[in-house]
Image (spheres, helix red, strand yellow):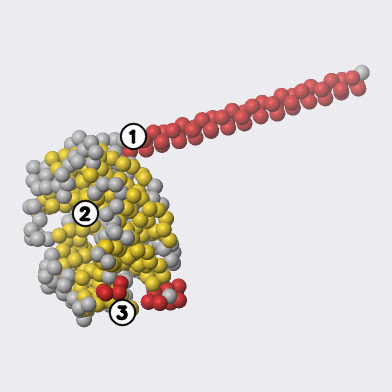
Amino acid sequence: MSIQIFKQQNTNTDTDMDTFHKNLHMHRIRNLCIAAGVFVAAVLCILGLQFGLQHRTYDSYEVIKSFDRIDTMTTQYTEFLHYVLKYSKDGISCVDANNKLVWSETYNMQSPIIDVCQGSVALADENGTQAMIFDETGLLSTLTTRLPIRQVVVSAQGVLAALLEDGDVMRLNLYNKSGEELVDSKFELQDVGYPLRMSISADATKLAVTLLQVQGGVVNTCLAFYNFDSVGENYEDHLVSSAVISGEVMPCVQYLDESHCFAVGTSQLLIYAGAQIPEPVATIPVESEISSVFYSQDKIGLVLEGEEQAYRLQVYDLVGKLMFDTEFDLDYRTLKFSGENILIYNEFSCIMLNNRGKEFFQAEFDESISNLYTMSGKSYYIVMHASRTDQIHLK
């Protein structure tokens, strides 16, 4: 009898344990399902929020701050990091979003030209001999060239490249951020052509130049790439790559970062990439007249003649993939990337597009616009009028 009782108790225990394990297993599955459901709901919520933000539109704005303008009507502006640069014939200043002075410098230039690359700024007197290099803290150096300056570009490190005119020779000089000369090279115009445009990579190791050539009555463009790093030392004059584009003028060439460069001609967009020697990545035919070219660090924009509206806007990525293609009617004066947005405006009107080409705001201003900048996200902007600067919030 005792043995039978013992066996019955063991059977009940086994059954209880089986039930316990089954319940534990079901409990774990239920918890996993709940966690998965919460995760999926959170992901859907985030995606829905992102979708809503990307497709949100605004129909009005409010002025949240306003500052009187004390600069002259000839003052020009450009974006620099999260600041605005104001420059004219007698000086340059850097102000923040609240119009607070960050730094300023005086000079005397007849025709100031400027170039910005990330945290560096180059300023020079076109056809003069004075150039200056700045960063976020202010003036780094002032230099004087021996020959008239035709163009300057700057790298993110503050290296300045200056194209200088010397009769039948164009000279290319490079200076470090302290103003010391690093490179002095020349272009014989009858041999290589007339330089149209140049651009330096963000790391200051590569330079792209477009050269106009006329051979047998045919106009060509030579796109030349120079490397001033150790790789370029193995090539004559540091020229590591070149290509002749027959029958076409290419007045635009631009490095976007350390390794990506593009050039635009009358009928095509060329994209190159390479850490040392640039190689062709994409050739994109352009079938209609190009009105404007604009760019950011990772996008290239073209404005063409429109089909249904006045203008057609195309934006490509760094491998030549078309990101979007849209049209608009505004007879614009300025079109640019600003933050994650595209701003299109003339004297009194503006259109704003998101990074997918969707229009999210348009407005008519009572006072003429001299400049417009993204302040934060999609809803805060700086509007510069003739007599004041406004911070606005879209609603």
Label 2 and label 1: CA atoms lie apart by: 27 Å
Q: Residue furthest top?
A: 1
Q: Which residue is mark 3?
A: 184
**Amino acid type at mark 1:** Gly
**Can you tell which of label 1 and label 3 is closer to the viewer?**
3
Q: Which residue is mark 2?
A: 97
Indicate which disc, 2 or 1, sits on the residue closer to the N terminus.
1
Q: Please state the horizontal and vertical placement of residue 116, each as a whole percent of the image.
A: 26, 63
The residue at 12%/73% (across/down) is 108
Q: Would you say the residues marked 1 and 3 are in contact, meaning their CB atoms lie under 8 Å apart?
A: no
Q: Please state the horizontal and vertical placement of residue 84, each as a whole percent of the image.
A: 21, 58
**Amino acid type at mark 3:** Asp
How packed is label 1: few (under 14 Cα within 10 Å), some, or many (20 or more)? few
Image: 280 above or below 359: below
Q: Which residue is mark 1?
A: 52
Residue 256 shows up from this direction: no
Label 1 and label 3: CA atoms lie apart by: 54 Å
Q: Please state the horizontal and vertical placement of residue 291, each as a whole percent of the image.
A: 22, 50
Label 2 and label 3: CA atoms lie apart by: 40 Å
How packed is label 3: few (under 14 Cα within 10 Å), some, or many (20 or more)? few
**Amino acid type at mark 2:** Ala
How packed is label 2: few (under 14 Cα within 10 Å), some, or many (20 or more)? some
Q: Please state the horizontal and vertical placement of residue 42, each as a whole percent of the image.
A: 45, 34
The residue at 49%/33% (across/down) is 40
Q: Quadrant of residue 238?
A: bottom left
Image: 336 above or below 244: above
Q: Say whether residue 200 is left or right of residue 143.
A: right
Indicate which disc, 2 or 3, sits on the residue closer to the N terminus.
2
Which quadrant: the N terminus?
top right
Residues 292 and 66: in front is: 292
The residue at 87%/20% (across/down) is 5
